[in-house]
Structure formats: C-alpha cells, structure tokens
Image (cartoon, coloured by chain):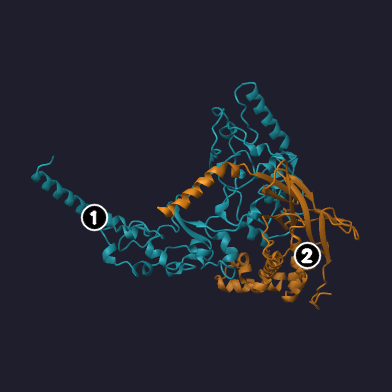
C-alpha cells in the first residue's frame, strides 16, 4: 500500500501543474539563409542548425570548441577515400555531399567508375535486372564512398557538442532557404536568450563557414534572424562567424594545402 | 432454489456444453497467426522469414520478402496432429487459399486486410541529413513554354523535382477516401454549411507501403539491412490499417503550381527534426507556415476577422472555407491561428 503512495502523489502534483504546463510560453525562430560570400549571393540551403538554450555566455565552452575545430573538407575527405576524379566531379556538379543526394542516371553509371563497378556487381547479384542494379546501386558502393562523409560529419558534431544538448535542430529548405524552429519553450515571461549554430562548416562559395549566433526569442511573435558573413576585419551583429578557406585537395595531393 | 436432481442434471449439461466447446476453442487458436505469442517472440525473424523469398522475380521484380515462411518454420514446433483439425484445417488457412493436401496456392503476402502487428521505425531527420543537397532539378531543362488547352502556360513537367520527400511520398493516382480531422477538445459552433468541394487525386501524397523504397538503399550494407527486420519493424498492439486520409485542410492542393515549386520542408518545417514516426501526429504543417506567408496570410486573417465579426454581431458563425471544408471551418478558431 505504501508503495503506491508516491505514485498517487506524482499524479496529484502532475494534475495540479498540468494547466501551467499546457500554458507554457512557446516561441518561434526563422533563420534566413541567404548570405553574401565575396560579393556573391549564396544560399545556405539544406544545412542543419542547432538551437541551444542560453546565449554566448552560457555556451562559451561550445563556442570555444567551434573556434578551434579542425575540419576535413568534402573534397579532401573524398580525395583521401581514393574516390575517382569522376566521382568527385559528379558530387560537385550538384553540390552533393553523398551519392544519395540525387538520382544516378544511366549516363552517370557509365561515366563514374565507382558507379559502374557497383552496377556490374548488382547485375550479377540481382539476376541480371538492370533496373534493380541501377536503382539499388548504392547498396553495392564501398562504405567510405557511400556514407563515410556523413559519418565523419556526424562524429565531428558529436565531438564538438561534447555533451551539450541542443533543444532542437532543423534544416534550411532549398527554396525559401529558411530553417524554422517552432514550439520553443520560453521559460521567462518576456524573452530569453538562445544560441544557434550549424556546428560543422557549411561549404559555401569555396569557404567553410560556421555560425554561432545569439538571439532573443519571446512568445509574442516569430523572430526572423538573417545569417550574415561580415566583411573581412568586421564583425557580424550578435554572431561569431568562423570563416575558413577550404583547403585545396586535388587528385594528385590529398593533403590540405 | 434448485432441487438436487435438477442441480445434478444442470451441472451435467453444463459440463457437456463446456466439453463440446473445448475442441472449437482449441481450433480457434489456430485460425490466425500472431507474432506476439510468447513462443514466436523468442524466435529471430530469420528463423522463419527468408530474404529474398524464391518467388521475388515474379511477385515484385526486386528481391523482397514476397511469400509466407515455408512449412519447416511452422512444423518445427507445431505437431500436425495438433493443428490439423477438420477437413479444412484453420491452421493451414493462415497462409493457404484452399487448405488441404492439394491446396498449394498461398494468399497474397502480406495479407493487407489482416490486422497489422508492427509499427514502423523511421527517423526522418537522419534521412534528411544524408540526402542533403543544394540542387533542385527542373524536369525539362531548359524551361519551355507550350500551349496547353489553347492557353499559354507552363506545363506540369516544369515543376521542379526535389530529391528528398518525393523519393518515398509520391502523388497518388486515385482519389483516396478522406475524413475531416476533428480538432480535439473542441465543439462545433454550428452545423456544417453545404459545400460541394471535391479534391482531386493530385492533392494527396502516398505513404510508403512495403519494402520498395526502403530496400533501394537498405537491402544490404546500410543498416538496418533487409535481414535486420527489427531495425524498422516494432511489434505493437494489433491495429487495422486505415486507407482513409484525415484532413484539417482538405482544400490544400500539393500540385498547385506555387506549392509544387516549393521544397516540402518549406511547409513541413518539423520533418527534419523528427527522429521517430510515433512522435508524428500527422504530416505536421504548422499553420504558421501559411498564416505568416505573403501568399495566404491576408486571406486567413480576413476569414478570422469575419468569424469574429459574426460572433460579435450575434449572427450565425462565419464558417471558414478558404482552407477548410465546413466540417472543420465551423469550429472555433484555435489559438495557433492567431499567433504571429
């Protein structure tokens, strides 16, 4: 009998606080991702952004890690993975990070050695069915080519977060180029400081860019926050922007220069 | 009060009745298969299911689990003497069209009208990350203008193709059954006004069914693979799969030009956050994506204003029809619609 008392107490407390929980203030944030890189307007599309409670002060350790982080660019990763120049060119043609980013056409299969090898393996495996061999082509690619870069990014993110838990994460879309965070619990009556960051560099216009920006969010209305890249020697308002020149990795040398 | 002889006769009849029912009860146990029995749950999926089944070429055209497990899977544990009850044993009817020694033909696999025993595990967030790309492909580059029904307009195949959600969610070809998604905890303000609105099939997107889209990437090498059933299928309380599409805003047309030009994530803003299908209540388009847009914001505000006026003037409540059919448009305006 005694054992059920704590449970009853929890239920009662929950019942008392239920209206408070339901009436929690919720905020919304729209991160607008059109930026100017070297005078050219670029889209930060299909990139993941993370939302952290608290501003720079509360997330100082994370910002410090972002400032000093090392990064292996997409080109260097695939170069080190011994991807063929044709495969790298195929990725670059449509700004892809992995072979999953677009459909692999019949022409692509003929032109990219990795695709051709996977296709031929699939033909043997799937009873000479060309459609299956081509549409299931990625299942016969080597892991480093297929999901290696994604896994590298994932492990970099985990390492950089170092146990810091974002309260939400979402991606920018490819048309309106916005990342929208909604139903953000606001613990104060007015507004509260949050930090947004993409954690790993977005490769845009030949640069690797990481944003860490502080933003006030209240429950009154959706906050719109435009990302920006400051001119050299200047700073962006409420943002630490870490811009790195992407190392040049070519087929002849995969060591960053 | 029953006399003693009567009690004895009654008891005897009761025992006889129960005894007569016992074989039937026993037979009923064999007329359906459940994955959730204690004995079945102990088994690994691959103890019974083979991937692919030998009939895949004809049944699917791609390597798939397209048939029931073989006899060895059943009779490894179940004795024929126990389960072969009657001329057409119910046990055999689980898989076979005509139970009997010559009834080789099997029912379609999976049997769509039977209760589902598994829910799906699918992290949208991971999939959105790995297919990330900046590129939008227009189906017929370069864009061209053609005469369509004697008017100058952009043809349908000029709509951009996004290499994300459409991989699994395609436009349906037949108009599905729909039902109004009644807002929970709300009472309608009036009876629904007459409305002859009928959507077309193009309004709706499909949900993946079967392994077709999953196996494209997960058949082998990328976990969960075709042999790791539990990576995607989670045993749950049996449920009947509904083919009816519940809708708040039946009037939303996915194929409308301005909608089709947009990336799905423009409106399905939370999809890249979703790590668990079970946490999704629905397709999850927050009203904010429409009500704060330059396209629909004004019209939505106007309808909300008309509702408020009708209530203030104690007239019949204005029923919102811009997005909703009256089944939904007659309900109170929810707080979400008022947030800016």
Residue at 66% x, 58% y: name it. Answer: B128
Residue at 60% x, 26% y: name it. Answer: B317
Q: Nearer the viewer, residue B244 or A225?
A: A225
Q: Nearer the viewer, residue B124 or B90?
A: B124
Relative placement, left or right, of A1 versus B146 is left
Q: Nearer the viewer, residue A151 or B265?
A: A151
Relative placement, left or right, of A122 versus B257 is left
Mark seen at residue B145:
none
> Which residue is at the far bottom?
A252
Q: Are marks 1 and 2 in contact (CB under 8 Å)?
A: no
Q: Colour of chain B?
A: cyan
What subunit carries mark 1? B
Label 1 vs label 2: CA separation?
74 Å
In this rendering, the label closer to the viewer, 1 or 2: 2
Q: Position of residue A134 (x, y in %)?
A: 63, 66
Mark seen at residue A64:
2
Q: Quadrant of residue B38?
A: bottom left
Residue at 27% x, 57% y: name it. Answer: B26
Q: Colour of chain A?
A: orange
Where is mark 1, residue-wise?
Answer: B22
Relative placement, left or right, of B113 versus B85 is right
State whether residue B82 is above or below residue B246: below
**Pointer 1: residues within 10 angstroms few (<14), some, or many (20+)?**
few
> Which residue is at the far left?
B5
Report helix, strand or loop for mark 1. helix
Does any portion of residue B257 appear in the rendered image? Answer: no
What subunit carries mark 2? A
Q: Position of residue B7 (x, y in %)?
A: 12, 45
Report helix, strand or loop for mark 2. helix
State whether residue A172 is above or below residue B285: below
């Amino acid at each position: 009998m005694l054992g059920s008392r704590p449970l009853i107490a929890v239920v009662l407390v929950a019942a008392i606080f239920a209206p408070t929980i339901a009436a929690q203030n919720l905020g919304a944030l729209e991160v607008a991702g059109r930026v100017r890189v070297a005078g050219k307007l670029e889209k930060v599309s299909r990139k993941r952004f993370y939302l952290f409670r608290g501003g720079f002060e509360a997330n100082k350790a994370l910002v410090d890690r972002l400032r000093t982080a090392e990064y292996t660019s997409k080109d260097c990763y695939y170069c080190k993975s011994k991807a063929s120049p044709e495969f790298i060119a195929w990725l670059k043609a449509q700004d892809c990070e992995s072979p999953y980013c677009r459909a692999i056409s019949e022409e692509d299969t003929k032109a990219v050695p990795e695709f051709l090898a996977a296709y031929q393996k699939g033909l043997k495996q799937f009873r000479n069915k060309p459609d299956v061999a081509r549409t299931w082509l990625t299942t016969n690619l080597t892991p480093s080519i297929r999901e290696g870069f994604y896994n590298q990014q994932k492990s970099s993110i985990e390492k950089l977060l170092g146990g810091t838990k974002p309260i939400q994460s979402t991606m920018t879309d490819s048309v309106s180029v916005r990342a929208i965070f909604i139903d953000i619990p606001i613990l104060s009556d007015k507004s509260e400081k949050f930090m947004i960051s993409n954690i790993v560099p977005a490769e845009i216009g030949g640069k690797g860019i990481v944003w860490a920006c502080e933003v006030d969010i209240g429950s009154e209305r959706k906050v719109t926050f435009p990302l920006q890249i400051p001119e050299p020697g200047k700073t962006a308002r409420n943002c630490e922007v870490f811009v790195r020149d992407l190392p040049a990795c070519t087929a002849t040398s995969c060591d960053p220069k | 009060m029953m006399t003693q002889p009567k009690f004895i006769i009654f008891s005897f009849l009761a025992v006889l009745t129960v005894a007569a029912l016992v074989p039937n009860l026993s037979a009923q146990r064999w007329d359906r298969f459940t994955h959730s029995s204690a004995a079945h749950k102990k088994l690994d999926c691959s103890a019974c299911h083979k991937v692919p089944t030998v009939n895949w070429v004809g049944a699917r055209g791609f390597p798939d689990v397209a048939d029931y497990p073989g006899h060895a899977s059943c009779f490894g544990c179940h004795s024929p003497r126990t389960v072969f009850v009657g001329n057409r044993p119910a046990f055999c009817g689980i898989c076979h069209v005509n139970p009997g020694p010559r009834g080789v033909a099997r029912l379609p696999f999976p049997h769509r009208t039977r209760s589902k025993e598994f829910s799906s595990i699918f992290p949208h967030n991971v999939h959105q990350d790995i297919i990330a790309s900046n590129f939008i492909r227009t189906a017929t580059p370069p864009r061209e203008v053609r005469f369509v029904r004697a008017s100058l307009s952009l043809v349908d195949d000029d709509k951009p193709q996004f290499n994300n959600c459409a991989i699994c969610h395609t436009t349906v070809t037949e108009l599905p059954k729909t039902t109004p998604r009644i807002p929970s905890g709300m009472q309608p303000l009036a009876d629904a006004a007459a409305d002859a609105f009928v959507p077309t099939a193009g309004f709706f997107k499909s949900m993946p069914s079967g392994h077709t889209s999953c196996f494209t990437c997960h058949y082998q090498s990328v976990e969960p693979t075709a042999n790791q059933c539990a990576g995607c299928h989670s045993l749950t309380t049996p449920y009947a799969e509904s083919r009816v599409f519940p809708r708040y805003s039946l009037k939303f047309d996915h194929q409308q030009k301005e909608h089709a030009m947009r990336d799905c994530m423009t409106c399905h803003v939370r999809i890249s956050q979703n790590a668990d299908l079970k946490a999704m209540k629905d397709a999850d388009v927050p009203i904010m994506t429409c009500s704060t847009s330059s396209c629909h914001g004004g019209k939505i505000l106007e309808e909300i204003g008309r509702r408020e006026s009708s209530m203030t003037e104690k007239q019949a409540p204005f029923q919102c029809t811009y997005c909703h059919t009256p089944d939904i448009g007659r309900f109170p305006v929810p707080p979400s619609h008022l947030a800016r």
